[in-house]
């Protein structure tokens, strides 16, 4: 009897049940189940008050939210404690690619780069802001638009 795996990295690998290979069909089934179970990421809050960001990275408690609309970001400046994070919500009908200053390096505050490209209606949380400083941010695609610029002050 021959079984052929049709999904995953071992697709079309014959699983032949012959003497000496009796467990091979079971292994193929296990691989298929494992492949089906992989993927996805959590966005549920963690038990410590933080949340997970798109890549599954745990972030500190959300201390502020910045929202973008057709008229720009609001508030333009937020002050948060060290160890916290900032949520960014795109309430505009257009996509925005929010990044840390300066443009185009985005190296001032890499934790803000986790906001990244946000389609209309999407939101994302920054990484942990663990160093006291002032971080500027902007829309990467419209870096000169003052309405799409702001600051995060970490104290």
Image (cartoon, rainbow, N blue to C red):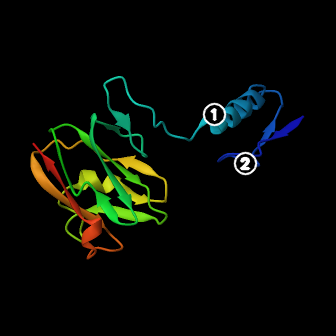
Residue 18 position within the rendered picture, expressed as x and y whole percent measured from the top left = 84, 31
In this picture, is 146 found above or below 114? below
Q: Name the foreground residue: 56 vs 78.
A: 78
Residue drawn at (45%, 32%), measured in percent from left and top? 44
Residue located beneath label 2 in the image: 11
Residue at the bottom extreme?
144
| Position of residue 17 in the picture relative to residue 136 (left or right) | right
Q: Name the foreground residue: 81 vs 31.
A: 81
Label 1 element class: helix
| Position of residue 17 in the picture relative to residue 126 (left or right) | right
Residue located beneath label 1 in the image: 34
Q: Name the foreground residue: 2 vs 78.
A: 78
In this picture, is 78 found above or below 120? above
Residue 48 position within the rendered picture, expressed as x and y whole percent measured from the top left = 31, 24
* The image quarter in which residue 17 lies: top right
Residue 43 position within the rendered picture, expressed as x and y whole percent measured from the top left = 46, 37
């Amino acid at each position: 009897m021959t079984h052929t795996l049709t999904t995953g990295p071992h697709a079309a690998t014959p699983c032949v049940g012959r003497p000496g290979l009796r467990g091979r069909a079971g292994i193929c089934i296990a691989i298929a189940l494992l492949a089906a179970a992989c993927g996805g990421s959590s966005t549920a809050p963690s038990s410590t008050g933080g949340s997970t960001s798109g890549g599954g990275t745990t972030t500190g408690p959300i201390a502020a939210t910045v929202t973008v609309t057709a008229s720009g970001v609001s508030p333009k400046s937020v002050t948060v404690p060290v160890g916290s994070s900032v949520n960014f919500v795109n309430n505009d009908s257009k996509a925005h690619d929010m990044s840390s200053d300066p443009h185009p390096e985005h190296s001032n505050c890499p934790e803000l780069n986790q906001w990244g490209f946000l389609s209309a209606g999407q939101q994302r949380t920054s990484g942990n802001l663990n160093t006291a400083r002032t971080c500027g941010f902007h829309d990467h695609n419209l870096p000169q638009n003052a309405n799409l610029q702001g600051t995060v002050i970490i104290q």
